Image (cartoon, rainbow, N blue to C red):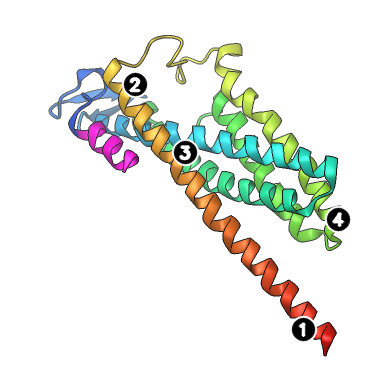
Amino acid sequence: MLTTIGFLMAFFYVAPVGGATVNGAELIGDVMVSQKMLLSQKIFYFHMPVAITSFLALGFGCYYAVRFLMTKNRRFDTCSRICLEIALLFVVLTMITGEMWTRFEWGVWWSWEPRLTTYLILMLIVIAYFVLRSSVDEPERRATFAAVVAIIATIDVPICFMITRLIPSSIHPVVLREGGMSPEMGLCVGLCALGMMLVGFALYRARFNQVRLTQRVDALKETLDDER
């Protein structure tokens, strides 16, 4: 409900970027773009919330990874894996919406801009996490190696967040610090972000329940096989 309200506000309550109208055109990246396309700025209200949710999912994945390394409790490995699954979903959504925004706002599909580059590295690390899990057969070693990669992925999160402050970029400004959002935009982004976090949590709980039920069924099958 919150994400739906936020997206409706983005289109019917918050003004287009720079007060643009739906007539005329504007030069973006040496390309004359219809100001109707400037409504693509609305992607921001989806792009930023999914990015924030991906960071949170990675943070919780790192927390459970550390707990597993400390206790060797497989339940924490399961929690960490599910968090990384949710993170991968939102990382991919962030990249897709970011590329759409890049094309419309900057006139190109890709730029080796600091934040884009560091986030691409983050996505590749998360993908490597699942490649690693599928390539190691022994459960204990698989969980241990995966936990280490989950921690490494999370280390890249503050780098992605702070990179535009450390290396200023003219095409990827620091919106919050530079006051680039009006109160209406801030309210809309806040609603979308809160709603997206709750969506992520709901996906986590649904996936966790599914995995736990599958594990219990497998355990019951093993028990019945032993009794036979």
Q: Residue at x 30, y 32 (%)?
A: 42
Give the spatial CA distance, label 1 vs label 2: 57 Å
Q: Which residues are magenta?
A: 1-11
Pointer 2 residue: 186
The image position of residue 163, as x and y in percent, is: 60, 19
Q: Earlier in the sequence, mark 4 or mark 3?
A: 4
Pointer 4 residue: 140
- Residue 103 in sight: no
| Observer-nearest of 206 and 22 | 206
Q: Earlier in the sequence, mark 1 or mark 4?
A: 4
> Is 79 positioned to the left or the right of 31 in the image?
right
Residue 112 tag number: none
Pointer 1 residue: 224
Q: Residue furthest top?
A: 178
Q: Are marks 2 and 3 in contact (CB under 8 Å)?
A: no
Secondary element type, mark 1: helix
Classify mark 3: residues with Cα within 10 Å, few (<14), some (14-19) or many (20+).
many
The image position of residue 98, as x and y in percent, is: 45, 35
The image position of residue 36, as x and y in percent, is: 20, 33
Pointer 3 residue: 197
Q: Residue at x 74, y 36 (%)?
A: 151
The image position of residue 126, as x and y in percent, is: 66, 44
Mark 1 or 4, closer to the camera: 1
Give the spatial CA distance, label 2 vs label 4: 45 Å
